[in-house]
Amino acid sequence: MHYPSLNQLLFSGLLLVLPSLVFSLPEDRDKPIHLEADRAQLDQKTGTSVYEGNVVITQGSMRLAADTATIYTENGSFQRMEAVGKPATLRYKPAVDKAELHGSSQRVEYDASQQTIVLITNAKVTQGSDEFTGDRIEYNLEKDLVKARGSAEQRIQITIQPKTKQ
């Protein structure tokens, strides 16, 4: 009986999970997904993959960097991802006519069903000259909606630049 190697299992898990992580330009969905990490572990029974050490996930304009990324699947379908770093960083281009979005925080969560990215603890999101900072920032990809929340230690700060005349 032939048993798959750990590398084969990890690669199979990535093929099932990563295509659903795409939250960037529509044409990025056809681009290859590249994941780098120092270590990886895939538990097929629980549908959980853990990537540790200098984790970088890229696809087209999307790039996520973290110390650790945990990806959760259910019946082979991507559900959510949690990334932790000091800080974890995210960048992507939501549309051709929009400025690239840059985010950083201690924790980044992505929920596929809600189409939301949540940045938690020392969160900062910059798009062009506009900037949101706070304890928690939620970005709804489908609605292009940002919500920010402060804490006792960190009030939200928002800077929105006036639109320039063309």
Image (cartoon, rainbow, N blue to C red):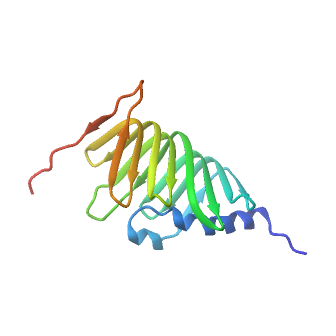
Q: Quadrant of residue 131?
A: top left
The residue lying at 22 percent from left, 42 percent from top is 160
The percent position of residue 41, horizontal first and vertical second, equals 72, 54
The percent position of residue 83, horizontal first and vertical second, equals 56, 47
The percent position of residue 27, horizontal first and vertical second, equals 40, 72
Tell me if 47 is positioned left or right of 60 in this view. right
The percent position of residue 98, horizontal first and vertical second, equals 28, 59
Could you tell me which quadrant the N terminus lies in?
bottom right
Tell me if 93 is positioned left or right of 46 in this view. left
* Residue furthest out toward the left: 165
* Residue furthest out toward the top: 153
The residue lying toward the viewer, choosing from 16 and 6, is 16
Q: Quadrant of residue 79?
A: bottom right
Could you tell me which quadrant the C terminus lies in?
bottom left
The residue lying at 44 percent from left, 59 percent from top is 115
* Residue furthest out toward the front: 114
Q: Quadrant of residue 75?
A: bottom right
The image shows residue 88, relative to residue 56, as above or below, that is above
The tally of labels here is 0
Tell me if 52 is positioned left or right of 160 in this view. right
The residue lying toward the viewer, choosing from 3 and 153, is 153
